[in-house]
Structure formats: C-alpha cells, structure tokens
Image: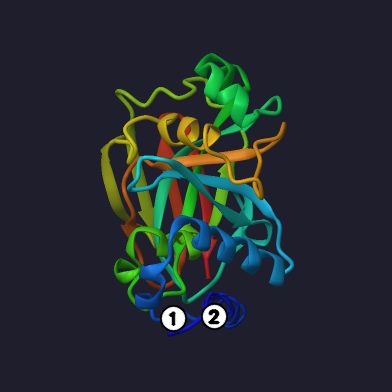
Amino acid sequence: MPTEADLTQQLIEAQRAGRHDVDAVPYAALDRAAALRIQSATIGALSETPALLKTIVTPDGLGACAPIYRSRVGNSGAFQLSSPTIVGLEVEVGLVLATDLTTDAANRDEIDIIEAISHYFVGIEVCGTRYVDRSLAGAYGGLADNATAYGYVIDPSHRDAGAEIGNYDVHLEFAGKEIWSAPAKHSFGTVLNSFIAYAKNQNPAFPLKAGTVVTTGSLCGLVPISGTGHVIGRLGNHAVSFDIT
C-alpha cells in the first residue's frame, strides 16, 4: 500500500513531466486532511504559488479549495497554455477580496463574507488531471489532484452583474467550433455557495486575505476538449480568449 509520501511524489513527478498516468485508486482512500496535506506538499515541492483559489463543496457539505498555480494563470488575449493533461474547459464567475476574511468572521455573519468582496470577473478554468481516470479518485482524492484545476484565464474587467447569472447564456468555442451554448447554471447552485462554504472552513495553508482571487465553480459543467486551438468563452458582454498549443 503506497504511503502518503509515495502518493505525493507520484503527483509531483507527473506534474513535472506533464503526464496523466497516475493510478487514482489509491487516492480514493484519502480523507480530507490527507488530501489537503498532499496538495500543500506538492505545491511546495514544485516551488509554485497560487494565483487564485478554486472553491468547492465536498460530499460532506463542507467547503474546500484547490490552488491554481501562478505559472498557469493569465489574462485574456495572448495567453497560451500547453499540456497533454488538459481535459476540458469551464466558464466561471470569480471574485477578488477587498479585505481579509477570517473563519471566525465568516461564521459569525454571512454579511461579513459579502462585504469582503471587492468585485467579480468572468474567467475560464482550464481543467486537467494527473490521473488516468479521475472518476476513481473517491470523495477526496480529487482534492489531492487540485480538484482538476490546471490553469485559468481571466477577463480583468469588472463584471457589473456581480454574482447574478439568471438570464445569462454561456457560449464556448474551441478550434473554430461552438462546443457549448446554454443558459448559465452553476455547479454549486449559486456563484457564492462554494465561496461561503470555504470562508467558513478555511485551510490555513490558503487563507482568504485581501487581494485573494477566487473562482467558485462552473456555469457549464466541464466541457471536454482535446488537441490544440483557440478558445473563446462568453458570458453576457464579457469574453475570454486564449490559445491551447
């Protein structure tokens, strides 16, 4: 049976080599704490830092997050990403914090959570995995793999509609073809649900400080892609574009 150190090293080596050949099955036995330790050990070993945090709600109903590495985050336009581990795209609404937000404050009053937000933006999460089959990773094994968060591309303009997604459609093009067109539907119900859940249950390794950039879940599920091409995603009057090479 592989140790936690073994599981960590497998993800580190796969990350460095750009491989998706890690057997997910041993990671299915991880609990939340072990998965988060692997997350932190991996980002440290790779000398990476998080450019933004992806918040999720785990099967136990608690919030969690995964770091998206700074080397893979950029603004819409000339940005490029390349990796054989990329599996899909997600159009999302994210937010930037104006002030520090502690767990105590978040649990005391949800108004404090909302008031900590500076502004919202539209972005595209580029999903990737180091697992051969991520569906075998269990309840928390996905957290060890950064919740399939490979990279992220941001439209830096502020979104006037904030967290509102009703009456908005998501459009996604890849390599000259439309691959998604449907009303926005958030994977966690609302733009703020996973953020609020994480604010109340923060990982000390990734605290919510002023200036922290957060993305809170897809408005179109994970739209699968393969190969290379130009990406354009739209939500209302916001567009995000970049290249997968």
Q: Residue at x 56, y 22 (%)?
A: 113
Image position of 233 (left or right of 136): right
Numbered circle sitting on residue 22: 1
Residue 206 versus residue 216: which sits nearer the camera? 206
Percent x, y for residue 48?
71, 63
Q: Note whether residue 150 is visible.
A: no
Please state which amino acid type lies under the numbered disc 1.
Answer: Val
Q: Is residue 145 above or below residue 181?
A: below
Quadrant location of the N terminus in the rendered image: bottom left
Percent x, y for residue 77?
60, 50
Query: Which quarter of the picture shows residue 194?
Result: top left
Image position of 28 (left or right of 115): left
* Protein image colouring: rainbow
Numbered circle sitting on residue 93: none
Furthest toward the left, the residue is 182
Q: Residue at x 51, y 63 (%)?
A: 34
Query: Which quarter of the picture shows residue 234?
Result: top left
Q: Residue at x 62, y 60 (%)?
A: 72
Q: CA distance from mark 2 to mark 1?
A: 7 Å
Q: Is residue 40 above or below residue 208?
A: below
Mark 2 / mark 1, whichever is N-terminal: 2
Numbered circle sitting on residue 14: 2
Q: Note whether residue 120 is visible.
A: yes
Percent x, y for residue 54?
52, 47
Say what secondary structure mark 2 lies in.
Answer: helix
Circle 2 Cα neighbour tier, 10 Å, few/some/many (<14 / 14–19 / ≥20): some
Pointers 2 and 1 in contact (C-beta within 8 Å):
yes
Image position of 64 (left or right of 88): right
Say what secondary structure mark 1 lies in.
Answer: loop
